[in-house]
Amino acid sequence: MYVPPHFAETDQDKLHDFINSHSFGLLVSQLGGVPFATHLPFLLDRAAGPCGTLVGHVARGNPHWQDLGGAAALAVFSGPHAYVSPTWYEAEPAVPTWNYLAVHATGRTELIDARDELRDIVRRSVAVYESGMPRPWQFDADSAYVDRLLAGIVGFRLRIGRLEGKWKLNQNHPAERRAKVIRALEAAGGENGLAVAAAMRQMLSAEDQP
């Protein structure tokens, strides 16, 4: 990913937190020599390797897994994003832009086909995504139904070799312009705009700290 120095986020704990908060990502590799992508939820093992390890599974009917074992792959995690109008700066020269947060994780993959490991991936996924439910669904790991379902999936690990974060939040503009963008985004509302405004405000506050 193209990351100019002023947009780079390199704090690994912050990047890991971002992955956990935006864990429905995009897995990209090659299938038959051409790019192929699958949208799916990931689990992050922070301590597995110097940059962590991503774990997930795909349907056995999805051909993506057929060329995945040992392949170089990219996992993309997208956060909030918002259009920025040049009129908000109340200054010239200025052009339109888009503010956003994203993390890219690249590394080598390995397939997981052992039943016990597949069952653990599903169990952990259910535990993570059901945790916020008022009445969490209970995963019966030993049921015959689950055992049949495991035959229909293929697991994988992506051992992260490079972790990149891009926090594109108008850092190339002076603080007064950034403050105007924050106010415009907050006035416009919307989940994405408010989240981008909050990230921009947090960054400005951190820069003000001695």
Image (cartoon, rainbow, N blue to C red):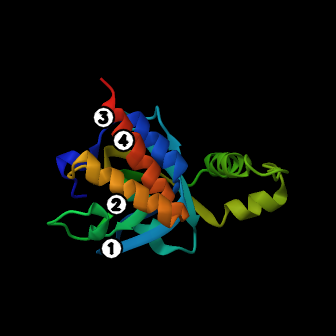
Which one is in front in this view, the residue at disc 1 or the one at disc 3? 3
Measure the C-alpha gap from mark 3 to mark 2.
Answer: 18 Å
| Residue 201 image point, x, y percent | 41, 45
Asked where in the image residue 168 lies, by quadrant, the reply is bottom left
Near mark 3 (Cα within 10 A), the count class, few <14, some 14-19 or many ≥20, is few
Residue at 51% from the left image edge and 53% from the top image edge: 22
Q: Which residue is mark 1?
A: 35
Q: Secondary structure at mark 4?
A: helix
Q: Residues at badges 3 and 4 in contact (C-beta under 8 Å)?
A: yes
Image coordinates of residue 60 in percent, x first then y, are 58, 69
Q: CA distance from mark 1 to mark 2?
A: 27 Å
Q: Is residue 119 visible?
A: yes
Tell me which numbered mark, 1 or 2, is placed earlier along the sequence.
1
**SS state under label 1:** strand
Residue at image location 75% in from the left, 63% down from the top: 148
- Label located before the other in sequence (4 or 1): 1
Identity, as a three-letter code, of the amino acid under mark 4: Met
Distance CA(mark 3)–CA(mark 4): 6 Å
Numbered mark located on residue 203 in the image: 4
Q: CA distance from mark 1 to mark 3?
A: 40 Å
The residue at the far top in this view is 210
**Which residue is tagged 3?**
207
Q: Is residue 188 left or right of residue 92?
A: right
**Relative to 107, is 61 above or below?**
below
